[in-house]
Amino acid sequence: MLSSTGSAGARVALPATPGAALSAAGELLLFILHWDGFKVFGLEDLAAIETLQVFDAVSSGDHLGMVVVTSGLHNQRLDETYFIQVHALVKPQLVLLWTSGPFNLPRVTIRVMPFPTQRLRRLRANESLRGLVRETHLHPGQFILPLFVCPGEGVRREIGSMPGNYQMSIDELVKECIEVESLGISGVILFGLPETKDEMATGAYDDHGIVQRAIRAIRAETSRLLIVTDVCNCEYTSHGHCGFVKDGDVDNDTTLQWLAKSALSHARAGADIVAPSDMMDGRVWAIRQALDANGYEKIPILSYAAKFASVFYGPFREAAESAPQFGDRRSYQMDPANGREAMREIELDLQEGADMIMIKPAMPYLDLICQARQRFDVPIAAYQVSGEYSMIMAAVQNGWLDHDRSMIESLTSITRAGAGIILTYFAKPAARLLA
Ligand SMILES: [Zn+2]
C-alpha cells in the first residue's frame, strides 16, 4: 500500500485510501497512520506542492504521524529545501523518529514553497510587534561626538558644509560637553585648530596646546563623559600632512615619535582614550610604549585601524582646516578597493596593543565592519564621517530626505553591520530622538 525508494527525496506511491483527500492537488495533508490504514488528521491549504513525499515520520504510541505532500503543478519554483515540523502538529507525548518497522519509512526532505504557511508580514503588523522582534537597537551610549576646538573666547562658528556642527573656543566647548553628557552620549573626540602651525607639528604634543587645554577644561566640568583624543599631526603641520615630510613623503618612523609624544601629552592632560588616526606603521606600538613607560598603562588605545583615503572626508577638512597643501594621503591611508588589507591592518594594530579598532568611513565600508565583527573579538568602532553627514544634511535641506529617518537608518545600518561604537555628527539629535 505504501512504498518508497528509501532515499532522500524519495517519492512515495499514493496509497489506495483515502483517495479523495490525496487527489486534491496542491494541498499539504497531515495524516495519522494507524496500523490499519490512513486517517486524515489535518489539512492545510498549501499551494504549490509538486510531489507526494514522506517527511520525517513521527511515531506516537500506535500512531504514525507524517506529512504527505500532494502534487500541484502551478508553481515552478520548488528548488528550496523546506522543513515542516511534524511533531508540532501531532503533539505526541513522546516523539521518536520512525526509522524501522513494517513500512520502513525513509527520512526525506520535502521540497515545497513555504508560502502561505510562512508569512513574514505577520510580525510587521504594528509597531509593538515590530519592536518585539527588532534585531538592532540604537542607544546614546554607543555614540561619540566629534568636536572641533579653536582659539579665542566665545567663539561658536558653524561649519558651512556640516550644519549643526561648530568650531568652538574652549569655553563654548565645555558648555557643549556638559550638554553632550546630559544626553547620555558616552564621549566626545577632540580635534584641535591651533593658533599656529609649523613643519614639526609642535602644537600636537605641546602640553599647553589647544587640545591639551581643552581636555583639562572639560575634565573639570564633567564627570563621566569620556574624552577621546584624535592623535595625529595634520591639524598642526604647516603642510597639512599627517607627519614629518621628507623627500615629498611622510616619514613613518620620525612621525611615530610625534604621535607618541602627542598621545602622552593627551593622557597627561586627562584624556580617557587616545585614538591614533595617522595610519603610520607601528604607531599603536609606539604609543603603547610611551604611555606604559610614563605610568599610563590604563589608558586604552582606539586605533583608526582601517582608515581609507576617502573623498568623504572633504567637509572635515574645512572643519579642521587640515587639507594637505600638496599631494594627497594615499601613501599612508588605505586604498578604498582593499578589503583584505583592511583585515591585515586591524590584525597588526591588535598585535601592537590596540584595545579597540575603528573603520573609517562607515557606510561605504559596511562590508568591512561586518567582516571585522566576525573575525575579531574586540570592540569595533565606525566613524560616520563628515561627508556621510553632509550628504544626508544636504538632501534634508533640499527636502529630498527626512532628517530623523535618514539619520536613524544610517546609524542602524552601521550598528547592524557590527559596529558597537559610532563616531557621528548626529550624536546629539540621535540621542534626543532615542531618549
Ligand atoms: Zn592626520
Image (tube, grey):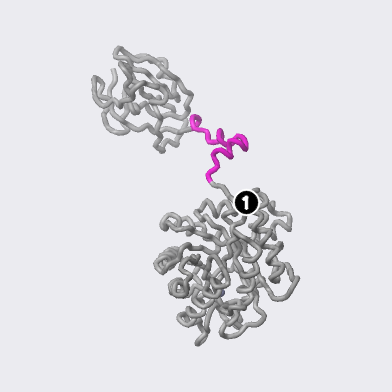
Between 304 and 60, which is closer to the camera in this rendering?
A: 304
Based on the displayed image, in which of its 4 quarters is residue 95 positioned? top left
- Please name the residue that numbered disc 1 is placed on: 408
Between 155 and 105, which is closer to the camera in this rendering?
A: 155
Please say if 79 is above or below 147.
above
Q: Is residue 105 left or right of residue 347?
A: left
Q: Quadrant of the N terminus?
A: top left
- Residue 59 screen position, x and y as percent: 31, 22
- Dot 1 falls on a residue whose secondary structure is helix
The residue most toward the right is 154
> Which corner quadrant of the figure contains ligand 1?
bottom right
Please say if 417 is above or below 159.
above
- Residue at (37%, 21%) from the top-left corner? 92
- Residue 252 screen position, x and y as percent: 47, 80
- Residue 150 screen position, x and y as percent: 68, 73
Q: How many marks?
A: 1
Q: Which residues are magenta?
A: 115-135
Does 128 appear in magenta? yes
The residue most toward the top is 36
- Residue 38 screen position, x and y as percent: 35, 15
Is disc 1 surrounded by few (<14), some (14 to 19) or many (20+) residues within 10 Å? some
- Residue at (61%, 69%) from the top-left corner? 215
Between 177 and 42, which is closer to the camera in this rendering?
A: 177
Please say if 355 is above or below 76.
below
Evaluate whether residue 44 shows in this view: yes
- Residue at (62%, 64%) from the top-left corner? 146
Based on the displayed image, in which of its 4 quarters is residue 64 positioned? top left
Q: Is residue 432 left or right of residue 86?
A: right
User: Which amino acid does the dot numbered 1 rest on?
Assistant: Ile
